[in-house]
Image (tube, rainbow, N blue to C red):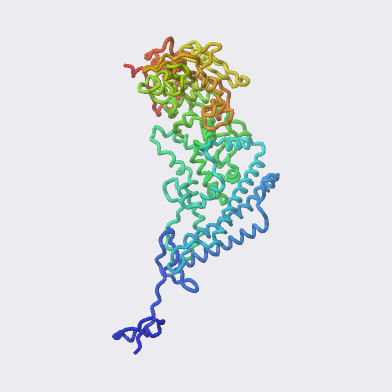
Amino acid sequence: MPGPGKNKGKGKPKSKAGVHQGTKTEPKATPSIQCLTLDEDEIARCGQPATEGHPRPERCKVHHGQYRIMYKKYKDASHVVDEIKKGAELPTDEQIGRYADYHAALDKARWVRKYLEAIRVERAGRNLHQRRFFLKGKCFVFHDADDGHKFRLKLLQKEMVKAVDTLDKLQARAFKLYMPDSPLHDLNNTVQSTFDPDLPKRTTEEVVEIVQSPDRLRNLVSITGKKLLAPGPTSGTGDEDLIDISLRAAPRGSRTVSNFESFWSTFSPTPGEPARVTWKTRFFIYQQFSRRIILHQPHLFMKSLEKVSFKDFILGDDFSLEDLFNFHELFRSPLKFPLLWFKDAILDALAISRHGTAANVGRLENRFSLLGGWVFNRAHTGTMSNEGWWHLVTMLEPPADIENRFVRVCNNFDDLVSFLSFGALGLVPRPSFCKSRPTDLLDPRLSRGHLSLSGVVVADMVSNARPPHMRGPIPTPRKAKKRGCVVWAEVESRAYMFGAVRNEPDAFTDAFLGELRARPDLFQVVTRSETDPGQEVEISGAGPSEALPQMRGRSFEAPPSLSPPQGVGEWQLTRSAVDVLYGTGKEIQGYLTLLSRNEKGWFFSLKKFNVKYFVILDTVPYRDHSILASNVAWAALCAGGYGKGEYDPRKHAIASDKLFQKCANERLGWLPKEVKWEATKMEDNLR
């Protein structure tokens, strides 16, 4: 009797004797196929058997139902995208500029938004399809999408970027037509064009990429530490609209942001009872900051019209993922270019809180209602109060070496002195050029603080340490002309301080410069007023024909010697004190040369007012700049009437304590009694 292998192909061995004859008539079991879908985590494969699909089962009942709904929805959206593209093109910049009525601009914006939302639906569906439903092949491994699918996604990416850009431009045009005489148009352009190299503006491509990436967007808006954008796990019924679930992730994040009190509380811990008054003020400041952000962003402002609250605005149908990202990034970055808006928000909040309402604050045409509150439609141009500066530096807690950003918010020299004074009181870290010394009395941080409190702005201090092998002239390998001699070289470098004083006539400024000029044995001084013509400077501390050397060198011939000989010969000027301001060398350029070239990032690059610059050189070569700073600080203390005569550590400490106490009372005296502060005394350290 033939075995069960009778009907098998050639070359197959027949079954051996003893095998059950009944096996050849038993039905062959169909192997169970596992569902070809990834679970919601997009990592693990669904564990259910595949029961649905044609010509062979590929998915379980739940995932088959979800797949059909998803596929139909993004295909329908694809038809909408193609139909809109056939009917009309996106308006060009020139066409947008010709709109003369903001209603027409908004109507076109609604059409673009419809197109954008269709793209968003199709992209979401195709991305879901690619991430979860592309398991194929005999081994059922994950395969990339086909070329047509990839090409369509790239096309949608480009079209989305164009649509977002066009929508922003239409809303900006509508904003300009809605408020034709608003000073914000020029102000917004100025703010956007003054980016520092370390404060880049994101391109539309970057924004679109971020908001389309679940992980990156989740990371951006998970303010409370929760996964706001991640849909919760569900067993599913097969009737779920996965595209809708994906797109509704943004409103889930928006709902958390729209609860403004919860949103803001993540930036500041709940205060104790003594600080509750200032905590309420700060909450109001953050509200005003939010209004300022919306006011300065045309695409956000036009969506805020007819909205009655912050929550109403965030949860509006026209508030998109891109809007959420842009608002969130600006709100989280007050130390970057929104710093001006944050400062204005503080002044808004303080002015309105004192009057109880904005109805009596400022001119009527300069304010309007926005999201249930008042906001001013222009920047504040007056001098900032001590209370305003205190809120600004204590709320933002700036790191060291970003003082130049705060110079941008100063409207005049008094503002700049106020900011630096709060730094001198310990509320802002000192810049890195204020390197500490072993002895506190020569700590340049203290000297710079005394100068700031006095009204002298120090923007930089520089000194070059003398190399150990250069205690005088050193021999060089150059060949000498005289027999039995070698060529010796000698270099001198002097410490210097760069800064500014008030440009207008001022008793203290005159007294301070007088103290410096009275000590040519200690200081060589160059001053430059911004209101003087050309590069006119005033020089003191040297003879009429003597150049002021910051660095100079000379060479001479002398016999070889173990100990350096006395230098002789004419000095060759390498860099003068004037060069510190106007030098054009390749390696070292003058401060005002950098200013004339619009170099960003240095102290005075974004200043709005005139000052009188100064360069002060030490007369003794190779002394550390801390000694120069201490001598200049003593000159300022004497000019202010706190010291007199020659420098002495005890007299310096007493004068410093008087100045510090006076300025602390002036800057912090307004604080409520619940907020404690105390001024330390240098004199106590001498006992």
Work out whether residue 355 can be spotted.
no
Residue at horizontal 48%, vertical 71%?
53
Up the image or down, 322 lies above or below 241; here it is: above
Work out whether residue 332 can be spotted.
yes
Quarter residue 270 falls in: top left
Q: Position of residue 536 (x, y in %)?
A: 60, 18
Q: Position of residue 198 (x, y in %)?
A: 51, 37
Number of marks in the image?
0
Q: Position of residue 81 (x, y in %)?
A: 61, 58
Residue at horizontal 51%, vertical 39%?
287
Q: Position of residue 456 (x, y in %)?
A: 49, 20
Image quadrant for the C terminus? top left
Up the image or down, 339 lies above or below 94; here it is: above
Up the image or down, 625 lies above or below 175; here it is: above
Extreme-bottom residue of the structure = 1
Decide if residue 499 is on the left or right side of residue 96.
Answer: left
Residue at horizontal 58%, vertical 38%?
192
Decide if residue 104 is on the left or right side of residue 307.
Answer: right
Extreme-top residue of the structure = 645
Image quadrant for the N terminus? bottom left
Report the front residue among 578 and 219: 578
Report the front residue among 174 and 468: 468
Extreme-left residue of the structure = 18
Report the front residue among 320 and 604: 604
Decide if residue 94 is on the left or right side of residue 59.
Answer: right
Report the front residue among 486 and 447: 486
